[in-house]
Amino acid sequence: MDSGRKRNESQGAGAGRVGSARELLDLLAREDAPVGWRELIALTESFQGHARSRLRKLVKGMLRNGDLVQDHQGHYHPAAADDSTGVLEGRGRNLTFAGVPVERGRGFRLRPGDRVQATVSGDTARVLEVVEYSPLPVVGELRLRGRHPYVESVSPEYRGRVGLDEPPAVGEDGNTVAVQITGEDRYGLTGVVTRVISARHGAAHAAETLLESHRVPREWPEGVERAAEKLPGQVQPGRHRDRVSLIDVPLVTIDGETAKDFDDAVFAERVRGGWRLVVAIADVAHYVKPDSPLDRCAWERGNSVYLPDRVVPMLPEALSNGLCSLRPHEPRLTLVCDMKVTERGNVTRFEFYEAVIRSWQRLTYNRVQEFLDAGALDVESEVQTSLKHLEAVYHALREAREARGALDFDSHEAVLELRDGHVAAIHPVTRKDAHRLIEEAMIAANVCAARFLESVERPALYRVHEPPDADKTEQLRQALAFAGVRLARGDMTPKLVHDALTQLGDRPDRWIFEMLALRSMNQAVYAPENKGHYGLALERYMHFTSPIRRYADLVVHRAIKAALHDGDPGFGMDWLATTGEHISATERRAEAVAWGVDGWLKCEYVGERIGDEFDGVVMGVTDFGLFVELTGFYVQGLVHISELGQDYFRYNQSSMTLVGEKSGRRFGLGDALRVRLVDVQPAVGKVDLLLVQGGKRRGRQAPEAAPAPAPSGERVPRRRKRR
């Protein structure tokens, strides 16, 4: 509240300054700052009981009559002629009203689809009233224990409990259900259970729940699968004499052990001054025509969603696992990028053309790695020769990547081994040269796609990764400084970040700083305007190599094929902009579902060991506690600040540490702790941990060149311990 608004109660000994509705409206009209109840008391000098009571009655009457409105933050406004009703739009918690961002705060629990009355002021909209709640249900886990049943939401647009207007007619405790929202009370939204989504357990339960909560399309509209089944069962090479025949070229696919949709096949041979690298990609655009039922469904889905127990494909399986998939020994239609790669890893020439291929082998990363390690594989000699040249091409491309300073992190991820739908084991993902070999070949083809379309002045969708924001890079700079790595001020180029992380050497906590670097980056998106790719240190980049599972690649294929035939791809810049925004959102949706299912299953896995002690590493530090990853389980839990000991802990943002006010005890990134698991809620990904007495096992030490900063920040009160 402004100092000018402050009033001493002795000054308000009278009956208050406002006696009528008109006076109150005039007073509010003169105020620039938001006016809540306390500010209203001060403005009207209604400090004494009778004056405050009269003001309350006046305000209630004006609200009833519509002369006064109250927004979702509790602020009062004169009813304006430009107040209007409309439907909130957006995704998750980022809402807009009439294209203007909604000012969020205490008050209404708002969701996309809610019809509200709102007023627009400048570049924000204030919601005054929820006229009608969104017809879209909230998805969550039914809790029937206790006197008041409720649903714990897992929907991305609303986190928290939904109270039930009446005992549910369907569902049992632990089922996931859909709730139709009918209102709200002081605790949150309220509603009625309309149906059971999943009464199962394990991977199927998690997948069905999160796919539903994020509204991922799973059913094909009538006629779409039938249209896919009407396509040819196999490719007849003789019917495609206008295409280049690569039937005799020993192309192979290299994918994971469980892959079924094979987008790409590769081949390399030695030529003068370097190598010829051929990347053949499934020609999905030959079968999926613009604005066809298949195309409309693919656009809506945006991409395939990969989960531990299933795949939700962008295209029907007759295409994704059948006619378009580059299965071994079967003729397939492809769009080929044929490149000349020099000894220094530069692509000096390239050509795109339509071809017919026949993959000679379906290889896996493990088998190719065995070949790279041992130099032999039980495949045709032509395939072995190609693999040797692919390895040489990879090393050349890798050197070029290092020279330009592209970022390259070894992922700190795990794959779940399922048995009867439940996690039997968690295995770390190991990224080997076989993976990198394919990555570098695909990156080279993607860059060529962008270069080619620019050369013929054809628009398409770029994969855009803009430089990180200054505040995020400053946090990374401070974290690295505390680890003993100094970064120069100014623009943080990818090469600068790459070189800084290289200075960490083989430190066991290096992966934590790599993760911090990733978190400091902006999300990559699809857009028709080229803004470069920061992470790969590339001036231009498009996605070309996965049209079976990404709609963006299908768009690029259509643009290339139209250029090859001097035709019209059937889209313009406006459509590209809309499509780029849409598929960027569906990509984030797919990632959220995949991460959510993985987290749910990991929580279930460790949840069987409540009460056990674990080794862990501090992955994040906040003003309310430590996020600790349980070693070997790849799941994070919270040690609340109240559990750190009999001390007040201050949060030091610059060093990302919690420091005891009296003891000087310090907790920071990379610290190894001993913790006890006390509670797990898999559906919402919540893991509660306690620090074992004396549980700091081997703390990360600040280097002598970078002494620990003095504690700073606000005192954080200790939370009452659970009973």
Image (spheres, rainbow, N blue to C red):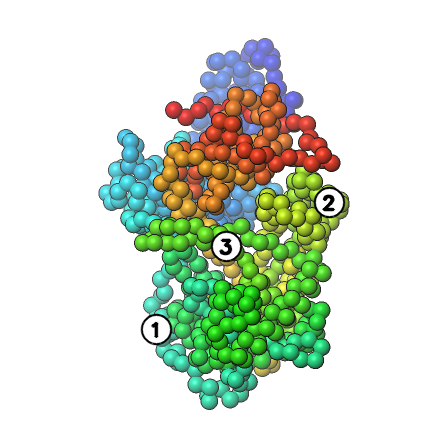
Give the SS element for disc 3. loop
**Neighbourhood count class around disc 3 (C-alpha, 10 Å): few under 14, some 14–19, many 20 upward:** few
Q: Is residue 489 left or right of residue 25?
A: right
For discs 2 and 3, the disc positioned in front in the rendered view: 3
Give the SS element for disc 2. loop
x and y, in percent, of residue 155 in the image: 41, 46
Camera-side residue: 280 or 543? 280
Q: What's the distance in space between the residues labelled 3 and 1, CA to CA?
A: 38 Å
Q: Quadrant of the N terminus?
A: top right
Q: Amino acid at mark 2?
A: Leu
92 is higher (above) or lower (below) than 616:
below
Q: Is residue 127 left or right of residue 343?
A: left
Q: What's the distance in space between the residues labelled 2 and 3, CA to CA?
A: 30 Å
Residue 528 location, quadrant: bottom right
Q: Which mark is on residue 226?
A: 1
Q: Is residue 64 visible?
A: yes
Q: Which mark is on residue 308?
A: none
Give the SS element for disc 1. helix
Q: Earlier in the sequence, mark 2 or mark 3?
A: 3
Q: Earlier in the sequence, mark 3 or mark 1?
A: 1
Q: Which mark is on residue 487?
A: 2
Camera-side residue: 340 or 375? 375
Q: Amino acid at mark 3?
A: Val
Camera-side residue: 489 or 299? 489
Which residue is drawn at the image coordinates 38% and 72% (left, top)?
318
x and y, in percent, of residue 110 in the image: 45, 41
